Image (cartoon, rainbow, N blue to C red):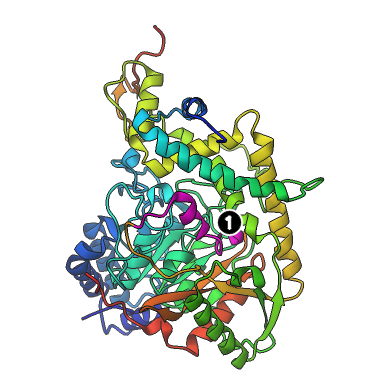
Amino acid sequence: MDYKKSTVHELHEKLVKKEISSVELTNAIYKRIDDVDDKVKAYLTLDKENALAQAAKVDTMIAKGETIKPLAGIPGAIKDNISIKGLRTTCASKILENFIPIYDAHVIENLKKDETIFLGKTNMDEFAMGSTTETSHFQITHNPWDLTRVPGGSSGGSASAIAAGEAVWSLGSDTGGSIRQPASFNGCVGIKPTYGRVSRYGCVAFASSLDQIGPITNDVTDAAIVLNTICGVDAHDSTSLPMEVPDFTKALRQDVKGLKIGLPKEFYGEGIDAPVKEQIKLAIEKYKELGAEIVDISLPHTEYAVITYYIIAPAEASANLARFDGVRYGYRNMKATSAPEMTTASRTEGFGPEVRRRIMLGTYVLSSGYYDAYYKKAMQVRTLIREDFTKAFEKCDLLLTPTSPVVAYPIGGNMSPLEVYMLDVTTIPVNMAGLPGISIPCGFVDKMPVGMQLIGKPLGEETLLRAAYTFEQATQFHKAVASLGGK
Amino acid sequence: MKVTAKDVKHIANLSRLTVSDSEMDKFLEQFNQILNYADILQKVDTTGIEPSPYVIPLNNVLREDVAVPGVSHEEALKNAPEVHNGGFKVPRVIE
């Protein structure tokens, strides 16, 4: 049996009705991984033994007639910067090549309570720094829609695992677009929740004021199901919000009548590829047809968002990654004869070039004499970016933009770091303002998926889900299956 | 050029990293490209604008002062590259 494009909610029904067992399902997905992952390379680590033991446990629960949670017995994949106790967690870095977490991330604790199944850990850009999954120390992940192209990043493994049928649901993390952009490149649904909705405890820190964990799934309903489990306050993360978590599946209504959707003109400029823009315009027409009201708005500080991000995120990263000193965990250079020399050599050999560049950029913008000109200035511009959104949301309920200016591009391109950074222009502002964003499939260009991004007010996930669900149910894009061709 | 090879060596030292001579030219070019682009921020008037280090109000989170189990000694050492007498072993610090 083939479970490509099978959703969590469909499989849950089948499990409960005993049409399939969790062991069958889990074995079938591992078979799929065996068959295709040498081409896709989505996974860094598999955990078959524990996964099958957990599947057997869920089957026993079902046999006994116990009520099971929607994610129980349904195999998912976890980005390799989220800790599962006892399972290697590398952040796709040499420096953590042999790191075994001694505790579960908060989201993993919650998922375990729901009796779900973890297939393994997925590839990513090293320390989530990148937009192509090419900066992984271990391997390059290939886009299942065309194996010669990138899967996007940094959660490229989590997205391509879904597109290739190598997992039913997955988790990614999003600091500047790292869930939404790969979801868009792979024809998946991906949500970055409001900053603070999900505890970051156990997610290896990159930029703490921006990082947020979220789901990548085959449809909007599944995204709501995963959100239900991972959201909520956690004593281990003082930035997790003490808010009641609604039942997000209740927001899934086919109704956008009267909903005001804002189109920020800065997201429809020259930087967006014309064929991508064309697909987004068709999506806008669809929303009009479905009864939404379209409003033109402006976010005037958008052009400053990318550089603001590439000052703030490296600054925070330079502090967060200072913990990698070769003393307590991680890679150590064994030849050094003094402790400071050991730390410098371990870091230089353990981090890849992109991570080193960002640590140094961050160190520079925080250093004496440059702090005000770069870091403080960027934090002030961040305030202006946030205020743009606040003003925009006085005129509309949510915003609609392309998720990325382009579709997935060829692996091994020769763009400079800055050119790659500029492609994050559509996703970064959302992190800067801490807002929720979702990417859903809305078309194809050159047979590659195009994603549309919806941006909500703080804690406005329900409105996003409702609008995304309404579009999805009125279209067929989410049902298209990746070809695994192109090579 | 915003930064020179000498500056890069200084930043590398602060970051506990080294940039080799063979990497230096490419590194300088990419680093300066990013810093030059950052000049566009000078167009923005930020007089009197409060910086946003975070986007949500940050409050101290307090709890009752009750002892709870922490990380065990054994677990804390589990990932250590070198262990000696129940501690983290490092090369000589003081000559």
Q: Residue at left 40%, top 28%? A: B18
Residue pointed to by mark 1: A233
Q: Residues within 10 Å of mark 1 (few under 14, many from 20)?
A: many
Image position, residue A481 (x, y; %): 32, 80
Image position, residue B8 (x, y; %): 49, 30
Quarter of the view holding residue B48 = top right
Q: Residue at left 46%, top 69%? A: A406
Q: Foreground residue, A22 or A210?
A: A210
The image quadrant where one finds the C terminus of chain A is bottom left
Q: Amino acid at mark 1?
A: Val
**Chain letter of disc 1?**
A
Seen in the picture, residue B91 relative to A135 is either above or below; the reply is above
Image position, residue A325 (x, y; %): 41, 29
Identify the residue at the far right of this view. Answer: B48
Image position, residue B11 (x, y; %): 51, 29
The image quadrant where one finds the N terminus of chain A is bottom left
Identify the residue at the far front of this view. Answer: B1
Q: Foreground residue, A20 or A135?
A: A135
**Mark 1: secondary structure:** loop
Seen in the picture, residue A396 relative to B54 is either above or below; the reply is below
Region in magenta: A413-431
Q: Residue at left 29%, top 73%? A: A165
Quarter of the view holding residue A414 = bottom left
Q: Residue at left 40%, top 46%? A: A103
Q: Foreground residue, B46 or A53?
A: B46
Quarter of the view holding residue A268 = bottom right
Seen in the picture, residue A180 relative to A122 is either above or below; the reply is below
